[in-house]
Image: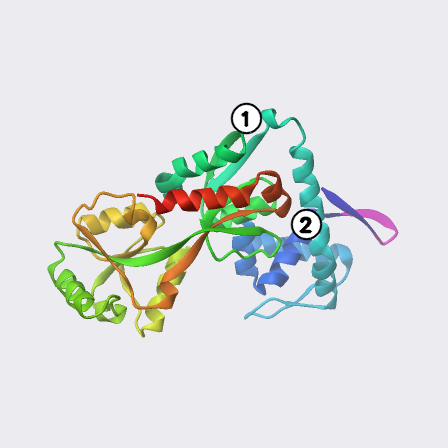
Amino acid sequence: MQVLYVYNDREKYMDIKDLKNIVTIVQESSFSQASKRLFVSQPALSQSVKRLEAELGVPLFYRDRSRALPTEAGMLLATKGEPLVLSLEALDREVRQLGKPENRIVTLGMSQFYGHHMLSKALKSFGEYNEGIHLQIVEGESYFLENQIKMGRLDFGIFPSPIYSSSLECIPIVEEEILLVINENNKEAMELAVSLEAKKQEIPIESFAKFPFILLKPELKLRSLVDAICLEHHFRPKAIFESENLDTCYSLVRDNYGITFLPNTIRHNKPSDGIRFFHVDTKLSRRDLVLVSMPDVAEKLQLAQVAKHIGEALQRP
């Protein structure tokens, strides 16, 4: 999709992707963070900006190593371009969704972990309010899924907060608690956890700073939350393994390679396997699992009712 503008008395077309790039860079104040949100390489993003600057004849960003500072022209493009981008993406979704309900295919995005542990409950809940609609599942990390929803490539998604786009409808499903997970054969860690738990319902996590941890990779949401929890308690966890998958972390704890943090969702869906879960003494250990979509899609698919139904199902054993 392209937007017409005039440059040097010749018709030129500003690609909507280039405009979206500018909007995202300004929102993130960073080329690297914007490239992650847009799922493009940083060199490709920089090249897109340089090309647009050459076509418009004005610089859009000051060259600053620490952050992306928009010029007056860059801020103007971002401010007036954002509603245009959202409007065109909404139009694209609306056109794609034309047709009889019984012929519609609705796409749901979930991470592999949540797909594994709660997909059947999500499907049943969605079917209660949307008969005759075919549901397709797309797996991916929440950053990717959020971006796909904004671009109209996914109808809705289920993943943890926070959500970074203010244009998306975010409906809470259930509150998750992040728990410390220890193998019962890890004698030293287990004895410490049991002893601390006996004195206090929630354990002080700094007591486990010396133990080896199995963690998610740094770019993932839960890892960011875990790092914040540990920083609050004045230590950095020593990661001996890093994975992209929560089930992998669980498996490595089950085989007694170390300890980890996992959402209580996994506690309700895994056999005990000699694994113990402990509450952590911090308010940061809680986050919302949310259902995310564009506002018009949320209304059409009755997603508020779907989210409530899923939440109730997850509370049942």
Is the residue 124 above or below the residue 203 in the image? above
Q: Quadrant of residue 151?
A: top right
Q: Is residue 9 magenta?
A: yes
- Measure how far apart labels 1 and 2 are at the Cα level: 29 Å
Relative horizontal placement of residue 19, taking residue 230 as reference (left or right): right
Residue 111 can be seen, yes or no: no
Q: Quadrant of residue 175?
A: bottom left
The disc label shown at residue 63, or none: none
Could you say whether the residue bearing mark 2 is in a helix, strand or loop?
helix
Relative horizontal placement of residue 115, taking residue 196 as reference (left or right): right
| Percent coordinates x, y for residue 215 in the rendering | 31, 56
Magenta region, residue range: 6-13
**The residue under label 2 is which amino acid type?**
Leu
The disc label shown at residue 86, or none: 2
Could you say whether the residue bearing mark 1 is in a helix, strand or loop?
loop
The residue wearing badge 1 is 132
Which residue is pictured at 24% across the width and 66% down the height? Answer: 201
> Count of labels shown?
2
Q: Is residue 2 magenta?
A: no
Quadrant for the N terminus in the image: top right
**The residue under label 1 is which amino acid type?**
Gly
Is the residue 160 above or below the residue 212 in the image? above
